[in-house]
Image (cartoon, helix red, strand yellow):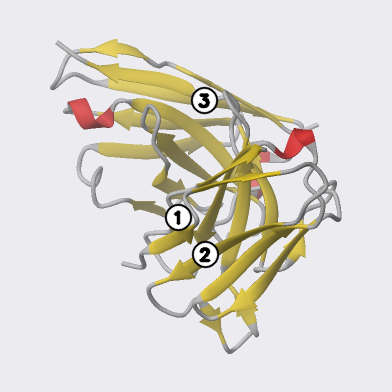
Amino acid sequence: DIVMTQSPDSLSVSLGERVTINCKSSQSVFYSSNNKNYLAWYQQKSGQPPTLLIYWASTRESGVPDRFSGSGSETDFTLTISSLQAEDVAVYYCQQHYTSPVSFGPGTRVEIK
Amino acid sequence: EVQLLESGGGLVQPGGSLRLSCAASGFTFGGYAMTWVRQAPGRGLEWVSSITRGGDTSYGDSVKGRFTISRDNSKYMLYLQINNLRAEDTAVYYCARDPNGDFYFDNWGQGTLVTVSA
């Protein structure tokens, strides 16, 4: 099974500052036949279900603000919030969907400093 | 607007059973794979089970043999039969839509809480 890790566990950032969340998979989630990384990012605000932010490692879901971006390949991925807004306070999860069982990272909590 | 509404959760004793339901609307249900994901209190997300458009199923190791996913496309309903419940099954259970059959999830319900306790 693929194990997903995230760093940091939590971070406190000032409004308008840049946020970087790292995600690492225990094996590559890159499928060479279609040149895609099977990695998604979700945001979960307190008391709410997750919402999809990014899929294929870097494709932003419709309606997601462009301050959110995803990058990386194979085993190392990053979610970046270019300018933190108050409504971005949440836990962020990465997820590999390369192989079953799909697996999520443990989450990174983002707070306002 | 895509809507997913889970129901059927509650308090159940260890060893008991429940049937969770997810009512879908706002999209052509039969054209999508569907999934259950759970979240224990204060914990992260755990994939539980998925069912393809054609009815093929898959399960996480922790629930295999105890949980059964099914769907009724005519009723726009997704189900999860959960048997032989354990304390560690206590969680909010979310149903989610898989837009392309690639096991990422673009729409989630609000969830239903299952509590396993004597």
Q: Give how far across and how far down residue B46 sits, in percent.
A: 39, 45
The circle drawn on residue B111 is 3
| Label pair 1/3, CB-CB below 8 angstroms | no
Quarter assignment of residue A13 = top right
**Labels 1, 3: front one:** 1
**Marks 2 and 1 in Cβ contact (< 8 Å):** yes
Mark 2 and mark 1 on one chain: yes
Q: Residue at x 59, y 27 (%)?
A: A46
Secondary structure beneath disc 1? loop
Relative to A31, residue B35 above or below: above
Residue carrying label 1 = A105
Quarter holding the C terminus of chain A?
top right
Chain of residue at mark 2? A
Question: Could you tell me the amino acid type at mark 1?
Answer: Gly
User: Relative to B102, is A75 on the left or the right?
Assistant: left
List x then y, in percent, for residue A95. 51, 58
Amino acid under disc 2: Cys
Write down the residue under mark 2: A23
Residue at 14 percent of width and 10 percent of height: B118
Answer yes or no: is residue B19 visible.
yes
Q: B109 above or below A35?
A: above
Q: Residue at x 40, y 16 (%)?
A: B9
Work out whether mark 2 precedes mark 1 in sequence or the reverse, and give the earlier one: 2
Determine crowd level at label 2: few under 14, some 14-19, many 20+ residues with C-alpha closer than 10 A: many
